[in-house]
Amino acid sequence: MRFLKKKIALSAASLKAKEALTKASSLFKRRSQGQRNKTQLNSSDPNSTKNIAKNFGKAICNFAYSELSLPYLTPLLKEKQIEQKDFRRFAVKAKDKIDGLFSFRSVLMISENESKKTKAIKEIFKSIGVIFIKFFSVNWIFHGKIFHKRTHLNFRFKMKNSVA
């Protein structure tokens, strides 16, 4: 009789475990579907384009300052005869300065009253920005904290086509 009681107890425990497992998996499916829907918002949402220039500008500054850009940056610095510490200083200041489209544009645009060194640094910064947009921005978009991924991809496509 005790063997029969053990079998009944074990089967009841396994049924409870199966029920808990199915509840947890259905809850996980519902949560993951909700997250997928959130990341694929329409680009008609006015907030989707609000910070694109700011996000790209700061990402380009981070890339320009990082060790990842060194294989691309070193030949450009040698060609223009600019020291790496001067360029990095410029990238850090530019990152702090960028807070929208116009400030990002002012970092990129070369004016007549700037020194030769500043003009050369801005040209290098533009080149590094193009490299980031072409080769590194998709990874940044999909693995970063960006909420409006599709809108950022469309903007990247427009920037890439305007540069190339």
Image (cartoon, rainbow, N blue to C red):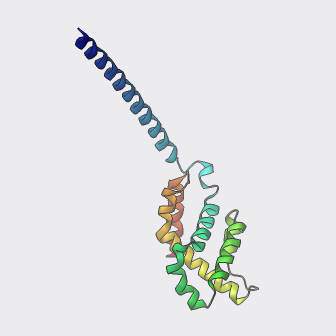
Horizontal and vertical percent for residue 42?
52, 48
Relative side of 14 to 127, left or right:
left
Residue at the location (63% across, 65% down)?
58
**Up-down relation of residue 56 to residue 46 (above or below):** below
Residue farthest to the top, as pictured = 1
**Up-down relation of residue 56 to residue 73 (above or below):** above
Residue at the location (42% across, 31% down)?
24
Q: Nearer the viewer, residue 89 or 46?
A: 89
Horizontal and vertical percent for residue 47?
62, 50
**Up-down relation of residue 69 to residue 118 (above or below):** above
Horizontal and vertical percent for residue 100?
69, 62
Residue at the location (72% across, 68% down)?
97
Horizontal and vertical percent for residue 155?
54, 62
Q: How many marks?
A: 0
Residue at the location (60% across, 73% down)?
65
**Up-down relation of residue 76 to residue 65 (above or below):** below
Residue farthest to the front, as pictured = 2
Residue farthest to the right, as pictured = 113
Relative side of 123 to 71, left or right:
right
Q: Quadrant of the N terminus?
A: top left
Relative side of 109 to 137, left or right:
right
Q: Nearer the viewer, residue 57 or 49?
A: 57
